[in-house]
């Protein structure tokens, strides 16, 4: 471990879901046999979870944990389950266990022990049923780190990935317009620009911004949010040196000729931008929380209770999330 320059935490998430097995599958795939070239040289992974659970799920999917642990690139930090977990069966007794993993990872990232954290999916209902109010990973990370505004961004993988950030996240559609403000959009675009520079190595990020209404409001005939809110916000950030363009009609923006030179698209609401991204990248996409003082990446899917313990779940998204966490941590260390 001493020879490794970066230490990254992986929280294994809901114990009844696919998180534990995907974690061991992703690490086994990425680190390979001892003679193979590892995917993440110079990185030590700390897997947070119940050791017995990880061993049991690894055996179910045909993975021997011992070579991984013997490699020195992976360690398990044991956190005991509240009650033995059954694949596919939720148990509120393990709600606080899931939060314990997340708290440990967040605290470790804040105090510098971890350069990044990667989160496997959790089940919100398990935590709420355990008596802890919980709305999601993103909101919890913001609260625990004291961050007033965070931005959810989903991204594909590869040399020129599609990245889509959201101005609003989990809101009813009827509430989206009222949630959009000039100041809020300015803060969101500032966060996107800053993190694309610091964590993704983009020297002059280009951000394409959608309108809210069909045809971007069609000069006010289909709504005035573009005129009264979005355009003034774009003028303010452009005056501050941010390359934010738009607002563009969302139904025509997601074309290769427009996206070719873009580093990110900012969509106004969840189902405006994410269906396109998930169609293009599902299974290899990732979720990144921008605006935090720490690096956090995650998968683009849920707990998949019906697949837990079967070996049929695809670890591609978790591998991509680890790739991104390693890359972002390295960019940040170079900028520090």
Image (cartoon, rainbow, N blue to C red):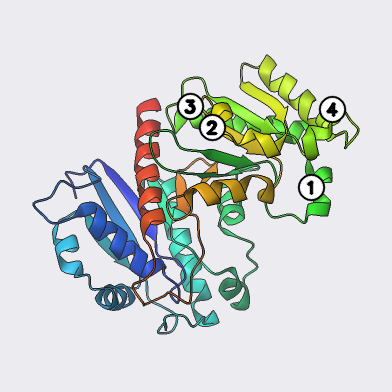
Query: Which one is nearer the viewer's eye here, 5 or 233?
Result: 233
Answer yes or no: is residue 181 visible: no
Residue beneath the point at 48% across and 75% down: 305
The residues tagged by marks 1 and 3 sit, at their Cα atoms, a distance apart of 28 Å
From the image, tell me which residue sits under label 1. 176
Residue beneath the point at 34% across and 62% down: 23
Image-based side of 102 in relation to 175, left or right: left
The residues tagged by marks 1 and 4 sit, at their Cα atoms, a distance apart of 16 Å
Q: Residue furthest left?
A: 35
Query: Which one is nearer the viewer's eye here, 134 or 158?
Result: 158
Q: Single out the mark in the foreground, 1 or 3.
A: 1
Q: Compared to 154, does 22 lie above or below?
A: below
Sequence-first disc among 2 and 3: 3
The residues tagged by marks 1 and 2 sit, at their Cα atoms, a distance apart of 27 Å
Q: Residue furthest right?
A: 221
The residues tagged by marks 2 and 3 sit, at their Cα atoms, a distance apart of 23 Å
Sequence-first disc among 1 and 4: 1
Q: Where is residue 20 drawn, in percent x and y?
A: 37, 69
From the image, tell me which residue sits under label 3. 197
Image-based side of 36 in relation to 89, left or right: left
Quarter of the image for residue 46 reads bottom left
The residues tagged by marks 3 and 4 sit, at their Cα atoms, a distance apart of 29 Å
From the image, tell me which residue sits under label 4. 227
Sequence-first disc among 1 and 3: 1
Number of other residues with Cα within 10 Å of mark 2, as a class: few under 14, some 14 to 19, many 20 or more: few
Answer yes or no: is residue 252 visible: yes
Image-based side of 130 in relation to 80, left or right: right
Q: Single out the mark in the foreground, 3 or 4.
A: 4
Quarter of the image for residue 68 reads bottom left
Q: Where is residue 208 drawn, in percent x and y?
A: 63, 29
The number of discs equals 4
């Amino acid at each position: 471990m001493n020879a490794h320059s970066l230490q990254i935490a992986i929280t294994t998430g809901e114990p009844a879901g696919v998180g534990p097995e995907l974690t061991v599958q992703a690490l086994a795939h990425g680190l390979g046999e001892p003679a193979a070239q590892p995917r993440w040289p110079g990185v030590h992974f700390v897997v947070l979870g119940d050791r017995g659970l990880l061993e049991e799920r690894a055996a179910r999917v045909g993975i021997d944990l011992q070579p991984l642990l013997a490699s020195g690139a992976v360690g398990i930090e044991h956190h005991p389950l509240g009650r033995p977990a059954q694949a596919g069966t939720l148990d509120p007794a393990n709600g606080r266990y899931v939060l314990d993993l997340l708290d440990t990872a967040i605290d470790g990232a804040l105090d510098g022990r971890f350069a990044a954290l990667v989160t496997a999916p959790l089940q919100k209902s398990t935590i709420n049923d355990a008596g802890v109010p919980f709305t999601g990973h993103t909101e919890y990370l913001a609260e625990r780190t004291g961050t007033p505004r965070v931005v959810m961004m989903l991204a594909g993988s590869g040399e020129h990935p599609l990245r889509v950030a959201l101005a609003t996240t989990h809101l009813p559609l009827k509430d989206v317009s009222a949630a959009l403000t000039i100041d809020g959009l300015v803060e969101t675009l500032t966060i996107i620009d800053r993190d694309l520079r610091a964590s993704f190595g983009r020297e002059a990020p280009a951000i394409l911004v959608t309108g809210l209404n069909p045809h971007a409001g069609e000069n006010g005939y289909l709504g005035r949010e573009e005129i009264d809110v979005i355009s003034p916000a774009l003028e303010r950030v452009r005056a501050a040196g941010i390359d934010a363009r738009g607002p563009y009609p969302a139904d025509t923006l997601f074309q290769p000729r427009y996206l070719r030179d873009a580093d990110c698209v900012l969509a106004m609401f969840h189902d405006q931008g994410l269906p396109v991204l998930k169609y293009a990248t599902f299974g290899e996409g990732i979720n990144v929380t921008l605006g935090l003082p720490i690096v956090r990446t995650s998968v683009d899917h849920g707990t998949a209770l019906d697949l837990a313990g079967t070996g049929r779940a695809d670890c591609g998204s978790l591998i991509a999330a680890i790739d991104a966490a390693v890359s972002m941590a390295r960019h940040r260390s170079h900028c520090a």
